[in-house]
Image: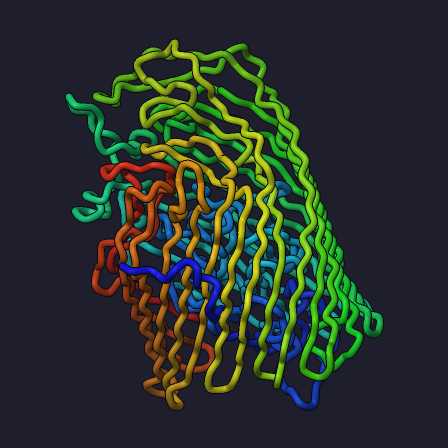
Amino acid sequence: MPTPDRSCAFLGCAATFLILSCSGGKVLAQSATPGTTMLKPVVVEADVREPLERRFDALPGGAARVSREELPDSANLTIARTLETVPGVVVQNFFGGNDQPRIQIRGSGLQQNPVERGILVLQDGLPLNRADGSYIVGLANPGLASSIEIYRGYMANRLGATVLGGAMNLVSPNGAEQPGFGAEISAGSFDQRSAVARAGFAGESMDGMLQAGHDQRDGFRDYNQSRRDSFEGNVAWQLSERVKTRLFVGYTDLDFDVSGPITKAQLKADPSRVHDGPTVTPEGAINPGPDVLHDRPGRRSESWLIGSRTSIEFGAHLWDVVLGYTHTDDVFRFPMASGERVTRGGDATGVLRYAWRGDAERALPLFEFTTQYIDGSADRENYLNAAGERGALFGESRLSAETLTVHAGFNIPLGEHWSLAPGLDYSSAKRRNDDRYTAATRPTIAYNPANPAMQLPNGAVPAVSTRYARSYDGWSPSLALTFQPDPHNTFFAALSRSFEPPTHDDLLATVNGTPYSSAGRPQPPNPGLVADVFRIPALKAQKATTAELGWRADHESFGVDAVVYRSEVRNELLSLRDESGSSLGAINADKTIHSGIELGARKSLGKRTRARLVWTWQDFHFDNDPLRGDNDLAGAPRQIITAALDHELTGSWSLQGVVRWIPERTPVDNMNTVWSDSWAVTDLRTRYRFNDNLTLFAEVTNLFDRKYAASTLVVDLARPDQAAFIPGDGRGAFVGLKLRL
């Protein structure tokens, strides 16, 4: 299909949908936006909106807030469904459950498999990213959140992030907002079962909330089970008129099968199957890819979190102090080419945010300051994948990381309607690996590609040290101009820079494996061939300069949030894979261009009908690369369109139809030789409210049972017969109940 001229990619409009306030509570103490921790709401005579809503509307960049009431009534409330109405946020499902979808904003971290960097993920303002910037997206449970805040691009700088993508903050409910007992239960196709229970209380100077969630499903595909159990609690004390402290704890146990990709022919014939490895023919191997049932890849992650957030107000001065510690046990069994990776460690976080209101009638503080420091370490062990079982140890590391970010910015009024927002950020990062593997050789394992049940003789290669120590630091200035002609319209223009150091997963990669041999054994029949097991690239930090224009409108009957941006990226971090899906390690691209339009619009069509449209257009490509020319970056759909129509049949009964559409094909590889086809999927939902305490909901997903690739592997050079396509779920039907006492 024809595509817009790249020279016009930064001309447009756009992004983000409506920003509505949470229901009920007087104190929204866990929003990540500076200045939202006030103990008393600001009352502005000319504007009756809540202070938090006013702050989001006034931000000079892409930002959105999704309240609990705006989340779809779904039995399978994944991150993808939660954020489907937020423009600029692209979530591509992998295996249909709570696993590892590819989430990216403005292309940051796009080419990791799975994506584990590129955005800052927070819960109640506490970063969930490890000290090296990596995160496990499946640990985030949107079903336990009262709202989700999205800060795109440099908007996240004021929260302690300097990455190209931005930040996502999951805000937990508290007892002041939701006192009493609530529960949800649902079930449906693919043996999907979900349950959530919560209980909150509120007193004169204290409130608290406990909640737990369970999600489980056998999945649409073979070898596709997933399970997640979550527990969260928070309690707050108002120590004085000026000081409030909230303590929170959390635990998540995540376990899922990695069904893996299949070929395009398999996708069209039977998308529920898994790939069974390459086929050996007299002319050579065809259909390269992992043998899923042989390797039985999967991931089991446990995470514990404890933290506190203290808000202090002295007149116009607001302080926010966040302290936290997270511990993660992560066991990731990759296909044989990479083996089993076991990572156990903890990260301590300290965040100090300060805001000086200046003029209490203005939505944004006059001055903002944030400093964030994360210090973490982890023990990592690498084992062979011996036909789905843990094999011999071939690597042992002590990974440590420190990341410091500092942000200072002003929101200077220039008369009644204009404001100028200069900002400056500094980031310093250290990454260190101490190689603790003491043997002289690293073992290898292989199976006969023509007969995978037959193990070949074991091998060994010389052990080369994987030790490294890297340091990165950089400055990221920004400047924004805002025009607000009235309380309901905001226009802005901004110029900013971003700085993103690599993670340990970028700096330490297993290489030279195949679908039937381990890392360090590129030829399965040859156990004596000497090859590297790990690759330790000397990576630079990714940097980008971004220009953006935007308009945000929030009226009773309609809303628009539009952003157009262009980013010139230097040293973009790319994680490469070969035609079998095996890792080649990470590299820095020289120059790339990321341009996009992020558009969200809502409109009331009478008293009972509402329409919403979200359009994300993105053009990410190399810029005169010596090998790849001006090719598109693999894995990025050119357009993502979501259209929703809500209709109230009666005061108690409502219907919703949602169409998700990828109208253009998507490149699978950076050489642009293999493409994923366009697709469109329709979902139907209904809700019946018996009374204020009981609601019944039901949904049918993929109504027309479309066979499509929800995502793909991202490789450098692909083959047409490669297993690179990850199917979306077939048609499913679900039903559930919500109870509130």
Q: Is residue 503 left or right of residue 10?
A: right
Q: Quadrant of residue 364?
A: bottom right
Image height check: is 156 above or below 493? above
Q: Quadrant of residue 485?
A: bottom right
Q: Residue at x 62, y 28 (%)?
A: 433
Q: Residue at x 57, y 83 (%)?
A: 488
Residue 26 in the image, given as x and y percentages of width and height: 67, 76
Residue 393 visible in the snapshot: yes
- Of all residues, the one furthest to the right in this rendering is 314
Q: How is this picture coloured? A: rainbow
Residue 615 in the image, given as x and y percentages of width and height: 40, 67
Image quadrant containing the N terminus: bottom left
Residue 30 visible in the snapshot: no
Q: Residue at x 30, y 19 (%)?
A: 447
Mark count: 0
Q: Is residue 349 left or right of residue 577?
A: right
Residue 665 in the image, given as x and y percentages of width and height: 29, 54
**Front position in the image: 184 or 18:** 18
Q: Is residue 116 left or right of residue 621?
A: right
Image height check: is 363 above or below 404? below
Image height check: is 688 above or below 9? below
Residue 48 in the image, given as x and y percentages of width and height: 63, 87
